[in-house]
Structure formats: C-alpha cells, structure tokens
Image: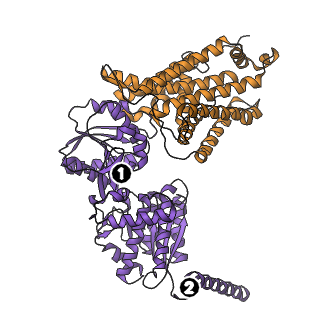
Chain colours: A purple, B orange
Amino acid sequence: MPHTAARRALRAAAVIGSFTITSALTIGPSSAADPIKIGSVLSATGPASFLGDPEQKTLKLFVEALNKKGGLMGRPVELVLYDDGGDANKARTFATRLIEDDKVVAMVGGTTTGTTMAMIPVFEDAKIPFISLAGAIEIVEPVRAFVFKTPHTDKTACQKIFEDMKSRGITKVGMISGTDGFGKSMRAQCMKVIGDYGITALVDESYGPTDADMTPQLNKIKNTAGLQAVLNPGFGQGPAIVTRNYAQLGIKLPLYQSHGVASKSFIELAGPAAEGVRLPAPALLIAEKLAADDPQKPVVTEYKKSYETATGQPVSTFGGYGYDGIQLLVGAIERAKSVEPQKIRDAIESTKGHVGTTGLYTMSPTDHLGLGTESFRMLEIKGGDWVPAEVK
Amino acid sequence: MAEFLQLVFSGLTVGAVYALVALGFTLVYNASDVINFAQGDFVMIGGMGTVFLMAAGLALPVAAFIAILAAVLVGLLLHRLAIEPARGASPVSLIMITIGASIFIKGVAQLVFDKQFHSLPAFSGTAPIAVGGATILPQSFWVIGGMLVLVLGLWLFLERTLIGKAVLATAANRLAARLVGINVTVVLALAFGLSAAIGAIGGILVTPITLTRYDVGTLFALKGFAAAMVGGMGNPIGAVVGGLLIGLMEAFGAGYLSSTYKDAVAFVAILVVLLVMPQGLFGRRSVERV
C-alpha cells in the first residue's frame, strides 16, 4: 500500500510539474494566475458537424483573442473542448467529465437539441451554468435555473413572418411544410402563434424531405379560393423545389420561406423562381447590407471579418451562436466579478440589451433566450440577391 | 379539368424517371437474375458528374457525355469486382452485394463530390408551357421523350440484334447459352454497362427538375424497383408502364387524397402486385416445362 501511494504521489507531482512547465511556456511568465476553465462539448464531427465545426472554430478564436488581450479579470481563460460526434450518450459522458474532472465554472456548447437535452440534467444537478447552442424551444421552455441558449427558435421566425404578413394586410394563408424534423417543428410552432396575428391557414399541405415534385400539393393550394399568401417551413432542397413549382404553376401570391433556407445555395437552387420570395434571416447573413446605424452592424461585421480571415471559410449563423454564447458568458463573469457558478448564473440571467450576432439579448427569470422578433430581418430576393424587405 | 391535367403532367414527369430506373433493373435482371440496387446510384452519378464537370468549365453536352462514361465505368467495375467474383452465389447474396455496392458508391460520392444539393440549367429554357389551364416545364418533355427513345432503343436491341438475343439467351439458361458459344461474362458486363448508361442519362435529364445530391439514388432505386415489380420484372415495356403508373398514382394520391401518404403509394403498389399478380402486369409467367 505505501508503495502505491508513494507512486501515486510521484505521478501526481510529475503531472503537476509538466503542467506548470507547459503553462509557463504558453502563457509566459507575466501571468501566474490559475486559468478560468470554461467547458464546451460540441458536435465538431459527425452528421451535425456543419453546425459544430464553425462553433468550435469560433470558440477557439474568441478565447485566443481574449487571452491575447490579457484574459478575464487578469486570469487566462482555458477552453476545455470535447467532441461528441453528434452522439447524445457521449455528450453526457463528456458533460460529467467537465464537471467532475475538469471542474469548469460554466459551459458553452451542446450543438444539437439531442446532445443538449442529454446534458441538461448533469449541469442542473451540479448547478453549473450551461449556455446551449441548439435550436429547439424545449431547452428553455420550461425555464431551468442553470440552462440558457443563444439561437433563435422557430417560434420567433414564425412570429416575424406573421408580423410581416399582418403589415401587408394578409389574413388567409396556405401552408406547405416539409415532413423532416425542421419542417414539422416549425409548422407546429407557427400553428401555435398564428392566431395571435389574426391569420388563419386555409390549407395545410406537406411533402416528404426527398420529394422531387410538389406540383400536386401546390395545385391544391392554387385552387383554394381566398388565399393571400403561402408559407413554406422547410429545410434542404424541398423549399427550392416548392419555389420552382410555385413559379411553374404561375401562382402570383406572395411566397414566404423560413430561416431554414437563409443561404446562398437556396437562391442558386431555386434560380429565377426565387424572385420576390420573402424570408426571415439573422443579421449576420446580410452584414454588409445593414444600415450604418443598425445596433448589430459593428458586432456582425467584426465577427464576420475575424472568422473569415482566420478560417478562410464563409461565416455561418451557427458559429455566430457560439460567439454570442461565449460573449454572454464572459460579460456575465465580468459583471459578477466572480467565477462562482451561482453568481455567473445570476449575472447571465440579468443580461440586458447585449448586442450579439444573432440579435439583442435581454434575459429574465422567465426568459432564458431573451431574443425578440427584431433578431430576424425580413429579406426579399431581388436580382438573385437578398435585399431588406420594405414594410408597406 | 385543369387540375387533373396538372396532376397528369406531374405524374408523367416523375413516372418517366422511375421508368428509366426500372429499365436498368430490367436489363440487369434479364441478363443475370440479379436485382441491382445500385441502379439508383447511376442516376446520381449522371447528375452529380455533369454538375461538377460543368462547374469545371465544360459545356453541358461534353460534361453529360463524360458523366455517362463515368457511370458506365462504375457499372463495369461493379460487375467485375463485386458480381463476377461471386459468380454462382444465390441471387439473394448477389442482391445483398449490390446493396453494399450502393452504400459504397454513396460514401465515395460524398468524398469525390460534396454533401450539398446541386442543380443543372434546364436544356431549353424554364418558361412553363400552358396546356389546357395546366402548365408543364420544357424539361419534362426532355425527360419523357428521353425515356421513350431509350425504351424503344432497348427494346430494338433486345429483340432485333444478335447481341440482344444473346443477353436474353443468357438470362434464360446460362449453361445452354455458353454451349452455343455466347461469352456469358461479356454479356453480363454489357448489361451492367448499359444499365449504368441508362441510369446516368435519366439522372442528367431530371436533375434540372428534381435537383441531385450524393444520396438521391436510394429513393430512385426503391421507386424504380416498385415500378419494375408492378410492370413485371424483366419486361422493358412493363418497366415503362409500371414507372408511369407509380408516378401517376403518387401525383393523384397527393393531389386528391393526402400528401402525407405520397411515398406509401409505391410500396402499397408492390404489396398489391405481389398478392394479386406476382408476375406483374407484363411479366412472364414462370411455368416449369417438364
């Protein structure tokens, strides 16, 4: 027994020794303070890597820049990153490791709704703040004391669209939704809030995620009397085909798409048929086109520039969620002047008017997302490009 | 009436693609009794290959030609590397090999191409043509016309040429075919190459309408298989009728009933055919002669 104990002590000493050497090498002699440990479990590889990869790059870039500026409260920040590969089981294991072994003070991560939901109980039990980067509204509804999130929800997008419809005097719409996860969830959210705007859906069609022809469904919509606009919640190629078929059938009603297709590839796939289509999109996608006095303009242009120069890849809203998450956390730690998890949590919850890439965050005990419909911009496709849609 | 016509156009366009895939099934099945589930992936190779060659600066006809050659090469390799070494295995094992090959092709396509959706410009404009209150895209005529030309060509090949007869003879009795001097291996390779070319041509024709991605082949294979089963496995005319029928049933189902069950139509059709007339509409009755 004494033999193993001695050996363990030796090994521990060796580990501590090597750690001090490496940290001395990386941080330099000027900062002798302990680093502040922030955890992150992301799906940097696997099926959700198109979300997790930009998030990981963004977090690394931000922490690097922060440490160059002297860190947080005079202490360097250490980002403890794990890659769950999109697997909820792994995510949960890593979450436990972050808390028990790495002893992080807070966590920014959780790329998908699945991984986030698996990790929530771990952080709630340990009372460590957890800022999720995943989409579903279930993460913050009902409100959990230590769980926050940065991406806007489908509900916000629906509200934005209905606001725009209302301002154009549209009260009767047709729905055509994808039956994939995104389309289903958004359709359900839209149906929940549609009544608040005095709008009714006269037809409610659907299509499979791999369907290649939506003219039968659109034909039904075309033959429904009294429609004033059509809304298409969907993701992937479906909305592009809907838009093409819509033009083929010569339907003249305004067509609304969702934020699920707010990318250049949608315009390319839908071609000339996309002219006049309206959709809600985050400010980050139209950074150059924002008005000079837009409160988000400086934030989005700076993030876009630093991300694109560092990675050589076009900026995405997903990386923006990570940027907003770590900024909210750093801001909260600065205001709390403490790295005690409970105090950080309180500070995050009291965030007021924080300008992020996704929108303006104002948290409260009943709202752990804090984004309003102003976080979306209504865009119209004109001449093969986005332009801000004028509200009539 | 306009609504009915619109659904007919929609059904015929989509059905023509199913028919082309079913034709590919038919050809390989005729020569080897194998149902080649990688048939849908030839459609993908045709579409994706053309997209990427055009992006590299080639003109559409050149890009399409090279993409078809690439698909033929993949078809030949599939035969040489996967089917030929397993010669003598039961048809079920061979079918499993083709499913494996299909997964492999999708995996490679993810690396060679990418994971995004792509489109091709329409061959002759995108202005819809109005017919009796309904509209049809010019590209739909290309798809339906291309399908008719291919099926006629294939029928002539099988019925009117010596090599075509050799394909049919190989299917009927491999040993007897060999005894009368038919090179069975060459015939099989020919069937795989030809079916790959047909699939790729189909893929190029429909990509302007349906878009393409590395994994579109699976759905085409399933629907095409349903079409081949309904029409009667092994009969080119049956493949066309089956494809168009499935396309029309899907369009009418989505238009008049509910779009929720659109994909179920093809599979319900398979079940009904298997229960009521297992040989399909035009299939040869399997009669054992003593």
The x and y percentages for residue A231 are 30, 43
Q: Secondary structure at mark 1?
A: helix
Foreground: A97 or B4? Answer: B4
Q: Residue at x 35, y 74 (%)?
A: A348
Left or right relative to A38: residue A350 = left
Q: Amino acid at mark 1?
A: His
Foreground: A146 or B46? Answer: B46
Cβ atoms at labels 1 and 2 below 8 Å apart: no
For residue A49, above or below residue A234: below
Location of mark 2 (residue): A28
Q: Quadrant of the C terminus of chain B?
A: top right
Counting residues from the N terminus, which is met first, the one under dot 1 or under dot 2? 2
The x and y percentages for residue A55 are 47, 63
Left or right relative to A337: residue B58 = right
The x and y percentages for residue A75 are 47, 84
Q: Secondary structure at mark 2?
A: loop
Q: Is residue A203 among what the camera can see? A: yes
For residue A150, above or below residue B7: below
For residue A186, above or below residue B128: below
How many angstroms separate mark 1 from mark 2 (CA)? 45 Å
Quadrant position of residue B283: top right
Q: Quadrant of the N terminus of chain B?
A: top left
Question: Which of the two marks, 1 or 2, is nearer to us in this view?
Answer: 2
Q: Within 10 angstroms of label 1, few (less than 14), some, or many (20 or more) residues?
A: many
Return the mark for residue A269: none
Q: In which chain is the residue bearing label 1? A: A
Q: Within 10 angstroms of label 2, few (less than 14), some, or many (20 or more) residues?
A: few
Q: Amino acid at mark 2?
A: Gly
Return the mark for residue A259: 1
Q: Are marks 1 and 2 on the same chain?
A: yes
The x and y percentages for residue A224 are 25, 31
